[in-house]
Structure formats: C-alpha cells, structure tokens
Image (cartoon, grey):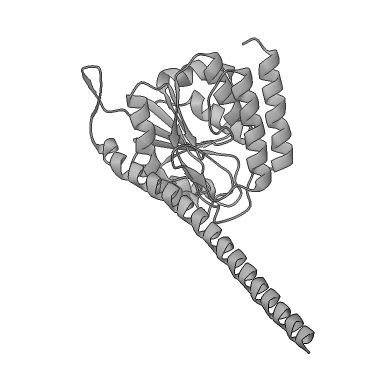
Amino acid sequence: MSSLLCVRKCLFLLEDAGHCYRTTFLLCLNLTKIVFSVTENQRRLQWCATMKEDASFITAQSKIGNEDWRPNVEVIIPAKNEVKMIEEVVKGVKEYADRIVVVDGHSDDGTAEIAEKNGVEVLIQKGSGKGAALREGFNNAQGDVVVIFDADGSMRPQEIPLYLRAIASGADVVKGSRFFNGGYSDDMTVARKVGNLFFLLLVNLFWSANYTDLCYGFKAFTRKSVKQLSPFLKSINFDIETEICIRSKKLRLKVVEVPSVELKRRHGNPKLQTVLDGARILRRIVRELVQVF
C-alpha cells in the first residue's frame, strides 16, 4: 500500500514538474517574441527620430564652404503599369522636388496619363526594363541633385531630405540602406534577403566597399556624378542598382549610405523576379570583375 502511495506521489510530482516546464517554455517563448518586437520598434523609432531631426532640411539653406546652397532637385521615377500608385507617389515627391520626370515603360493602364494630369513630365521609354528607364532618365537629367525613386509606393518621399543632407556634406552618390542605422524592410522575402547578402559580400570583397545594402533603388546623385556614371551604365533590368554601386567604386566617387525604409507593395505584383534577376545581378558582377574599367 505504501509503495502504491509512493508511486502516486511520484506521478503527481512529475506532472507538476512537466507543468512547470511547459509554463517556463511558454514564458520564454513569449519573452523572445517581446524582445524581437521591442528591437524592431526601437529600429523604427530610431528611424523616426532621424527623420524628425532632418525634416526641415529641404526648406532651409545648407552650406558647402562659405556659399549658401539650395539645390535644384530632380526626381526620376521609372514606372510601368502603376496606375493605382503613381498619383500618390507623385504628390508625395512634389513637396521635395523642383522637377519630376516619370519614365514610362509603355504602360497600358493609364499610368502616363495620370502622371501628366498631376503636372509632371512624362518620358516614354524607348526600350524596356528598369535599367534602361533610369539610363534614359539620366541622359535627360537637369537637376543639381538627381534622385531615383520607385513608382510602386514602397519608398517614403519624406526620406529625401536625408539624401540631400548627405549630398550637402560632400557625397557624390547617396544610397539608401534597409540595414543601416534604423532602416528596415517590410517587403523582403527570405530568398531576397539571402540573395542580397550574397551579392553584397561579393561586391564588398571584390571592390573593397563597405556597403550594407545592394539591391535597393532609392539613390541620389550630384549632377557631376550622373555625367560621370552615365557613359558606363549598360544594365537594362534590375541589375542597374548593382552596376551603379560597382561603377561608383571604380570611378572613386564618394558614396554615403543613409537609413531607408522599404514598405510593402500595396497594389499589383512585384516586377522583380527573384531567380531571373538574381542571375542577371550575378552576371553583372562577373562582367564588372572581368572588365578593368
């Protein structure tokens, strides 16, 4: 009888221990979720604080040397079938730009017409592909500062002052980074993250760069750097972003990164094809490695 009581007590103790272990495990799991959530919120708050600090830059005068400098800002927006977002994007950019050029890739949904109704210049692309659109935009650029900006609503116009501050500080090229000092992405799949990291490591290794992001299209350039880069840019598709980063290093341009946020696309499907465009980017890196200049 006493043996039976001992067995029962042992079973009760094991059950209590199991309950404690389960409780502890769930508690640790919840704490982990909280930590990750707090970390992400801190990154976003850091980004917001940076933006608040720099929000007035565009309306104020900056100084390089002893001269007041108020740049003429031009924004180039490559677009194809973005009728649901182009008006919102254009209106957001207008606050910071003196000239906006939408390079339309033969849209069949009225994107070009909506852009024109909103008072911006529309350049009908001769070829096809994002790279070709940006190259045509560069060839027609007139601004002191040229900003390239996507038409799908994934970029925030209010970040433009950060890019202008970096230009005012002496940068030739300013590139946004989703992995630098508070930047983040709401729209990166695991495959895109792995690919971006792999290509980033290659570019940093082969060209002694210290980039923190590579396959991201939010960038700003001085007029001089646009003229220097344009003759050497050959990419037709999304590999243009990688080519710009590599060519900037080859030309010894001063490149500065600023934190940037990539939002999730709200309408339509992404134009980027992970496998196909990944192969194009790798091919571009190999070509640039083989070419001395």
Q: Residue at x 66, y 40 (%)?
A: 194
* Residue 229 appears in the rendering: yes
**For residue 157, side relative to residue 102 (left or right):** left
Residue farthest along the bottom direction in this orientation: 1
Depth check, front residue: 16 or 203: 16
Q: Residue at x 42, y 21 (%)?
A: 172
Q: Position of residue 78 (x, y in %)?
A: 53, 38
Q: Is residue 205 above or below residue 14?
A: above
Depth check, front residue: 8 or 27: 8
Q: Is residue 208 above or below residue 110?
A: above
Depth check, front residue: 144 or 25: 25
Residue farthest along the front direction in this orientation: 2
**For residue 34, side relative to residue 46 (left or right):** right
Q: Position of residue 41 (x, y in %)?
A: 44, 53
- Tell me where residue 68 sits by quadrant: top left
Q: Position of residue 147 (x, y in %)?
A: 44, 33
- Tell me where residue 245 sits by quadrant: top right
| On-image quarter of the N terminus | bottom right
Q: Is residue 115 above or below residue 212?
A: below
**For residue 73, side relative to residue 191 (left or right):** left
Q: Position of residue 33 (x, y in %)?
A: 54, 59
* Residue 272 appears in the rendering: no
Number of marks in the image?
Answer: 0
Q: Residue at x 56, y 65 (%)?
A: 27
| On-image quarter of the C terminus | top right
Q: Residue at x 71, y 21 (%)?
A: 286
